[in-house]
C-alpha cells in the first residue's frame, strides 16, 4: 500500500498541506471526562475560530429538555484551539457540543456529576475493616469509571513499609479493592498471576511513593494504567523510579515495569493528579534531605509519561506535607524542611512547617506560569506526615505529628477553598465520638488518604495505615466516610 501511494503521488506538484479539519481532541485533559456542575472546563482541539463570534458550547439538559448553553466569560476564553467554559447547573451526562465560529458542530461525550458541598461539621469516621498488612507510607489511588447512570470506583494500594526492630522495611505488595455504596470498601485483594505469584507486585519494594491511575475518563490514555512514583527502597533511600502496569476495574493485569523516571529521586513528595497531569512537589532526596524540586508529567496517548518537566523551585524545601492543585493555582503546606529519617521519623525535636507556598498554574497546559512565593500560614502549628484529602470545596488534614498530637487535639482539621486558594485550617472537625482515635485508631503518623465521588456527587474518602504515635506500633486499620 505504501508503494502504491508513492506511485500515485509521482508527478504531482508539491505544496502546503491542506488545513486540518476542525475537531475536539480533549475535554478537561481527557478523552471522555467526568465533569462536575459549576466547575471550570477546558476544551482542546482545532478550528474553533480565533474569536467566538456565533460560536457556542452546549451540554445535554436535565429532564431531556434539549440543550443548555455553557457560559464563555470573556473573549480571552475562546481561541482557535482552546475554549474555557463552566459546566451549567442543569447539565447532565451526554453530548457536549461546540459550535465553531464558522458554524460547524463538533461533539464529545462527557459524564456530568452534581456538585455536592462536603460539610466538615458532620464528618464522622467509620471503621472500614483492616488492610492485609500493617503498613505505613502506602501509595493510594482511586479510579472513577462511569457505569450506566452511575460511577464505580476502584482503589489501588501499592508498597508501604513494615516497622521491624525499629526500622521501616518497604514492601512490594499491590492490592485492589472496590469502593461500595455509602462510602464502604470491599476486601483488599493482593495481586498476582496464577502462574507466577510475584508478577503483579512492584519489581522493587517502595514506601512513601505517590500513586496515580490514568483512564480515558481523566487523561488522554485510552487504556487504564497504575503508576507508582518515587518512594524509598529497601535501603531507605529515595528513588526516581516510576513503575506502571495495565489495570482493569478489578485487578492489575500486567507486570509493573519501569517507565520514564523522575528527573531526581523523591520520597514523601506532595503528589497531586488532575486533568491528566501528575504533579510531584518537594520530597526528600536519597539521603533524607527535603528538596525544592517541582516536576509535572502528562500521561500520554500510549500511557507513558510525555516527559517530566522541571518547574519553578519551591521557596522552601518541603517533604511529608500536603498540596492541592486548583484550576489555576497550586498550594503546598506543612511538612518538614530539615533532614529526616525515612518516613519523616517521630522525633518531637524536628521542626515542622506551618507555612504554605503558592504559585500560578495554567489551566490549559498544566505548567506553572509564575514562580512560587510564600503564602499564608495555613496551619496553626507545624505539622507533617499527615494524610491530605481534597474534597474540592474543603480540604482535610488527618493525623500527623504536631503539637498536641499525643492527645489527638486536632486529629482532623479542615480548610475551605477560597477561589483558587485555601483558607486557614481549623478544627478539630467532626464528631468526637466518631473520630479515628475513638475507634482504636490511636494517633496516626504517616497514614495515606484518597478521595472519590459517588453517582450523586457526594464525596467519599478514607485513610489507611500509619504508626500510632503513643505506642510506636503499626496500624492495619482503614477508616472512611
Image (tube, helix red, strand yellow):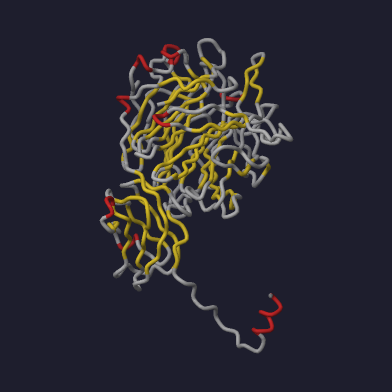
Residue 415 appears at what percent x and percent y? Answer: 35, 31
- Outermost residue toward the top in this view: 471
- Residue at screen point 61% across, 38% down: 252
- Residue at screen point 45% across, 29% down: 334
Q: Nearer the viewer, residue 454 or 195?
A: 195
Is 449 positioned to the left or the right of 395 in the image? Answer: right
The relative height of residue 99 versus residue 404 in the rendered view (above or below) is below
Q: How many marks?
A: 0
The relative height of residue 429 versus residue 45 in the rendered view (above or below) is above
Q: Quadrant of the N terminus?
A: bottom right
The relative height of residue 311 versus residue 3 in the rendered view (above or below) is above
- Outermost residue toward the right in this view: 195
- Residue at screen point 31% across, 51% down: 91
Q: Is residue 373 visible?
A: no
Residue 333 appears at what percent x and percent y? Answer: 44, 33
Q: Nearer the viewer, residue 369 or 71?
A: 71
Q: Is residue 9 visible?
A: yes
Q: Quadrant of the C terminus?
A: top left
Q: Quadrant of residue 403?
A: top left
The relative height of residue 49 versus residue 83 in the rendered view (above or below) is below
Residue 107 appears at what percent x and percent y? Answer: 40, 62
Q: Quadrant of residue 419?
A: top left
Residue 341 appears at what percent x and percent y? Answer: 61, 23
Q: Nearer the viewer, residue 407 or 206?
A: 206
Amino acid at each position: 500500500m505504501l508503494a502504491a501511494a508513492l506511485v500515485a503521488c509521482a508527478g504531482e506538484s508539491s505544496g502546503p498541506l491542506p488545513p486540518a479539519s476542525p475537531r475536539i481532541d480533549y475535554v478537561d485533559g481527557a478523552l471522555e471526562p467526568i465533569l462536575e456542575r459549576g466547575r471550570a472546563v477546558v476544551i482542546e482541539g482545532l478550528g474553533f475560530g480565533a474569536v467566538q463570534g456565533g460560536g457556542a458550547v452546549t451540554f445535554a439538559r436535565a429532564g431531556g429538555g434539549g440543550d443548555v448553553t455553557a457560559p464563555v466569560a470573556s473573549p480571552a476564553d475562546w481561541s482557535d484551539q482552546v475554549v474555557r467554559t463552566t459546566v451549567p447547573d442543569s447539565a447532565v451526562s451526554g453530548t457536549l457540543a461546540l459550535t465553531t465560529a464558522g458554524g460547524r458542530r463538533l461533539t464529545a461525550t462527557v459524564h456530568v456529576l452534581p456538585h455536592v458541598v462536603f460539610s466538615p461539621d458532620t464528618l464522622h469516621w467509620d471503621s472500614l475493616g483492616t488492610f492485609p498488612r500493617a503498613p505505613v507510607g502506602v501509595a493510594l489511588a482511586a479510579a472513577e469509571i462511569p457505569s450506566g447512570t452511575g460511577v464505580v470506583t476502584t482503589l489501588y494500594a501499592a508498597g508501604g513499609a513494615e516497622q521491624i526492630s525499629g526500622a521501616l522495611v518497604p514492601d512490594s505488595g499491590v492490592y485492589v479493592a472496590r469502593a461500595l455504596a455509602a462510602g464502604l470498601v470491599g476486601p483488599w485483594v493482593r495481586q498476582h498471576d496464577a502462574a507466577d505469584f510475584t508478577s503483579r507486585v512492584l519489581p522493587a519494594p517502595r514506601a512513601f511513593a505517590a500513586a496515580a491511575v490514568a483512564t480515558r475518563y481523566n487523561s488522554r490514555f485510552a487504556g487504564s494504567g497504575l503508576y507508582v512514583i518515587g518512594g524509598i527502597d529497601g535501603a531507605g533511600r529515595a528513588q526516581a523510579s516510576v513503575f506502571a502496569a495495565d489495570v482493569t476495574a478489578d485487578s492489575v493485569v500486567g507486570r509493573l515495569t519501569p517507565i520514564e523516571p523522575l528527573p531526581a529521586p523523591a520520597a514523601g513528595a506532595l503528589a497531586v493528579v488532575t486533568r491528566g497531569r501528575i504533579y510531584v512537589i518537594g520530597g526528600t532526596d536519597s539521603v533524607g534531605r527535603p528538596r525544592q524540586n517541582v516536576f509535572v508529567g502528562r500521561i500520554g496517548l500510549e500511557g507513558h509519561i510525555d516527559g517530566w518537566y522541571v518547574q519553578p523551585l519551591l521557596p522552601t524545601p518541603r517533604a511529608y506535607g500536603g498540596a492541592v492543585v486548583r484550576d489555576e493555582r497550586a498550594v503546598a503546606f506543612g511538612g518538614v524542611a530539615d533532614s529526616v529519617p525515612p518516613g519523616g521519623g517521630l522525633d518531637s525535636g524536628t521542626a515542622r512547617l506551618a507555612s504554605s507556598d503558592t504559585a500560578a498554574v495554567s489551566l490549559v497546559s498544566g505548567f506553572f506560569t509564575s514562580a512560587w512565593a510564600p503564602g499564608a500560614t495555613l496551619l496553626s502549628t507545624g505539622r507533617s506526615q499527615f494524610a491530605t484529602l481534597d474534597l474540592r470545596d474543603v480540604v482535610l488534614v488527618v493525623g500527623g505529628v504536631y503539637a498536641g498530637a499525643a492527645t489527638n487535639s486536632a486529629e482532623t482539621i479542615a480548610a475551605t477553598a477560597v477561589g483558587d486558594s485555601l483558607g486557614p485550617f481549623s478544627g478539630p472537625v467532626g464528631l468526637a465520638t466518631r473520630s479515628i482515635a475513638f475507634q482504636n485508631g490511636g494517633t496516626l503518623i504517616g497514614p495515606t488518604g484518597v478521595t472519590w465521588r459517588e453517582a450523586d456527587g457526594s464525596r467519599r474518602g478514607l485513610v489507611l495505615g500509619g504508626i500510632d504515635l503513643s505506642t510506636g506500633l503499626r496500624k492495619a486499620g482503614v477508616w472512611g466516610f
